[in-house]
Amino acid sequence: MAWTPDRRSFLLAAATMALAGCAPDQAGQSLGDTPEPAVNAAAGIGSPPAAQATASPATAGGPAAQPRTVLTRDEVTKTYAAQAAKYWGLEAPGVLTRLPPAAAGVTLTFDFCGGANGNGADLAILAVLRQLHIPATLFLNSRWTTANQALAKDLAGDPLFELANHGTSHRPLSVTGRSAYGIPGTRNPGEVYDEIMTNDAVLTALTGQRPRFFRPGTAYLDEVSAQVVRSLDLIPVGFTINGDGGATFPAATVTREISRARAGDIVIAHGNHPAGGTSPGLVRALAVMKDRGETFVPLPRTIST
Ligand SMILES: [Zn+2]
């Protein structure tokens, strides 16, 4: 797609903001609007490595939870320690970046990053989704959940929303300590495990079942980390449409970007910056999309390659 001068200015602004508060995450996502990625299926989402799999304590969810066999921390360390990572970015092999070809609609995802400048809650987003009965996947970071416990519990009880894992400390997922927008990534497979599974336990306690989806802080990851995510029976999720540039876009830009989504697209926006342009832009975008008959679907729980 062509990048307009308008978009360039936002990218520059977002990059400038990368040193402040939750902005690094926002900048990362504002830079992620790359041309139409397909499902990065080279590594085969849906077939996590089975080597030495044993039951993890985290599989003990509520009564309705399916038994899920995942690697332990030690097994992750042993299995992935010798694997070299070459890719670094938003669309590592194994990441779900676009819905399968048969998808009947658009998937909306919202990140709740937490942190000093990221613990807000954009209630207008939740209200419009509920009003229009539009499903969405909400990626919660541990820091945000800790700061918004009552709201998190409310969201967990609403079948319209699927709660997903946005990491424990909001770190990019790297097996070598690579950074994204000034945020140091995890340094080895064990830290990748911790970044995922500490918040996994938080979400499991919140909802009564393990989450199914994971998106790292900044959305950056390498391909080895993507495999670690999958070995933990989680689907790493990217996006095709950057809806709010990390909550830096004004409302009109949010409307323009989100409303261009068509069936198969995964839209990312943020639910933790109520003073930004995300919610007013989203409200108008959803009206446009409803008028043209667009439908909204949840993320697929399994992906075959
Ligand atoms: Zn985030």
Image (cartoon, rainbow, N blue to C red):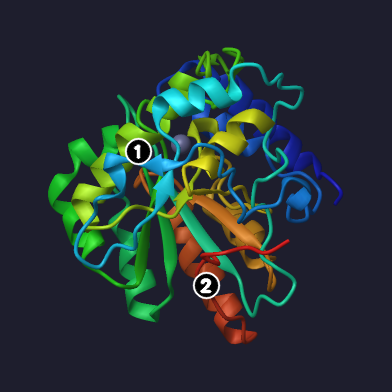
Q: Position of residue 134 (x, y in %)?
A: 43, 75
Residue type indicated by callout 1: Asn
| Tag count | 2
For this orientation, the residue located farthest to the left is 150
> Which residue is label 1 attached to?
141
> Which residue is label 2 attached to?
286
Within 10 Å of disc 1 (Cα), the crowding (few <14, some 14-19, many 20+) is: many
Could you tell me which quadrant the C terminus lies in? bottom right
Image position of 141 (left or right of 248): left
Which residue shows up at 19% across the image and 43% down it?
148
Q: Tag 1, which secondary structure?
A: loop
Which residue shows up at 71% across the image and 22% down it?
85
User: Which picture quadrant has residue 94?
Assistant: top right
Q: CA distance from mark 2 to mark 1?
A: 25 Å
Image position of 102 (left or right of 219): right
Within 10 Å of disc 2 (Cα), the crowding (few <14, some 14-19, many 20+) is: some
Mark closer to the observer (2, 1):
1
Mark 1 Cβ inside 8 Å of ligand 1? yes
Q: Position of residue 166 (x, y in %)?
A: 42, 40
Q: Nearer the viewer, residue 289 or 36?
A: 36
